Image: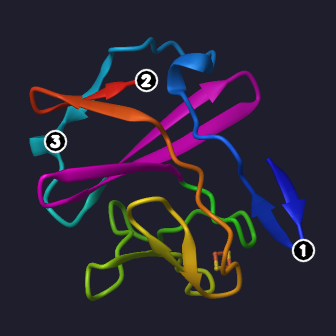
């Protein structure tokens, strides 16, 4: 990660199995059905002094995972547990300054970090379970 023009630039998706946080590829984070439609489930991992906060957003049968750091000022996106979508349920929203992000790829499409992206967390869904990559 690096900062450019005041926004955090992220290039690569995050692989949880590559971090020293005690999870390996194929571990189950949770079942898709553990996440209510339209909400997200948050996970927090620590590796030494590093804290990795991620969330998995569900929309219908689809799930999307991101690091919970806004590329604008580095704050968490949400204020309330599991609430990341704006009112229409179309975009993820940062509650600090209102940036909107596409669910599909985390690209900011409106707000102060327009064109920057959330860092994607790689996941697999198999037999209704969300698994670590
Ligand atoms: S910190 Fe997210 S929009 Fe400013």
Tell me where the magenta segment starts and ends, as one range.
41-67
Using the image, tell me which numbered label, if any, was put on residue 5: 1
Q: CA distance from mark 2 to mark 3?
A: 16 Å
Residue 32 tag number: 3
Q: Which residue is mark 2?
A: 133
Give the colour scheme of this rendering: rainbow
Query: Residue 114 colored magenta?
Result: no
Question: Residue 97 at x, y = what percent?
Answer: 62, 86
Q: Residues within 10 Å of mark 1 (few under 14, many from 20)?
A: few
Mark 3 and mark 1 lie on one chain; the one further toward the N terminus is 1
Label 2: element kind: loop
Q: Nearer the viewer, mark 3 or mark 1?
A: 1
Q: Are marks 3 and 1 in contact (CB under 8 Å)?
A: no
State the residue at coordinates (70%, 86%): 112
- Answer yes or no: disc 1 within 8 Å of ligand 1: no
Quick one: label 1 or label 2, which is nearer the N terminus?
1
| Up-down relation of residue 30 to residue 91 (above or below) | above
Sort mark 3 into few (<14), some (14-19) or many (20+) by Cα contacts within 10 Å: many
Decide whether the magenta segment is chiefly helix, strand or loop: strand
Residue drawn at 62 percent across, 58 percent down: 69
Q: Residue 20 shows which numbered tag?
A: none
User: Distance from label 1 to label 2 (Cα)?
Assistant: 31 Å
22 with respect to 117 (left or right)? left
Query: Which label lies toward us, 2 or 3?
Result: 2
Q: Give coordinates of residue 13: x percent, y percent.
A: 58, 40
């Amino acid at each position: 990660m690096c900062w450019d023009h005041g926004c955090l630039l992220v290039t690569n998706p995050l692989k949880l199995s590559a971090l020293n946080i005690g999870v390996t590829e194929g571990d189950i984070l949770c079942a898709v059905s553990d996440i209510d439609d339209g909400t997200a489930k948050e996970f927090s991992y620590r590796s030494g002094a590093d804290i990795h906060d991620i969330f998995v957003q569900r929309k219908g049968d689809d799930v999307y995972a991101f690091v919970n750091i806004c590329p604008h000022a580095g704050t968490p996106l949400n204020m309330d547990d599991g609430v990341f979508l704006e009112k229409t349920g179309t975009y993820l929203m940062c509650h600090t300054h209102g940036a909107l992000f596409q669910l599909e790829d985390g690209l900011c499409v409106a707000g102060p970090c327009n064109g920057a992206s959330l860092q994607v967390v790689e996941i697999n869904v198999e037999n209704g379970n969300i698994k670590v990559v």
